[in-house]
Amino acid sequence: MSIYKIGITGSIGSGKSTVTRLISESGIRVIDADKISRNITSSDEIVLHELSKAFGEDIINADGSLERRKLASIAFSNEKNKAQLTTIVTDRVKDIMWEMVAELETAEKLVVMDIPLLFESGLIECFDEVWVVVADKDIRYQRAHKRDGISKEDFDARDNAQTSEVDKIAFADLIIHNDKDHQALETKVKIEIRRIKQISGIDR
């Protein structure tokens, strides 16, 4: 049996990262697309050059690091910019992720992949299950604002640039509602962790 692959996504502020943290703490291997992206944009000079060429030199700080919030504001402002960001960063992230999965094939029975742009990247057919974390939009904004200090305008731009929650739900194998407290979310996630461990053969 090949490695059982689960893709997790969710709109900004949904709590997707909390879900994947709980999964990782249970001992399941998690591949984080955002972490890979941060590594690439922190250390890959070619990628940083391409980003500055596409979105302006002011997205690069004086120390050579990427001003991520400024890039996000520009990249999610319209479809053309979003497509450019995908070409420069997302395609490379996808390549690295699948290289990591290939390396895990002989050592692991189950892998979870945290991918914010899972639907936008056309990857849903690559997984045995697709999970979507959802929450009320006002709640998501409050979480994102508290975490990142993001303005309502930037939040709406980023949210509108992604596949809508309605469309994500339509294609999801599992929907995790995260409108309540942390305990409710943790209880739900732990139930699903037990299930996927059994399905993948970890707990038999």
Image: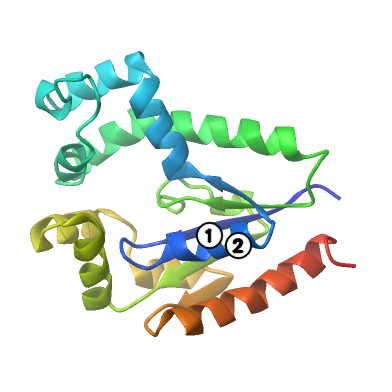
Residue 151: x %, y % from top left = 11, 59
Residue 197: x %, y % from top left = 76, 65
Q: Quadrant of residue 164?
A: bottom left
Q: Residues within 10 Å of mark 1 (few under 14, many from 20)?
A: many
- The numbered dot on residue 180 is none
Determine the secondary structure under disc 1: helix
* Residue located 90% across and 67% down the image: 204
Q: Residue furthest right?
A: 204
Q: Amino acid at mark 2?
A: Ile
| Residue position for label 2 | 23
Q: Quadrant of residue 12?
A: bottom left
**Taking 122 as reference, is 134 left or right?**
left
Q: Nearer the viewer, residue 141 or 175?
A: 141
Determine the secondary structure under disc 2: helix
- The reply to whether callout 2 and callout 1 are in contact (CB within 8 Å) is yes
Residue 170: x %, y % from top left = 47, 72
Q: Nearer the viewer, residue 85 or 143?
A: 143
| Residue position for label 1 | 20
- Is residue 26 visible to us here? yes
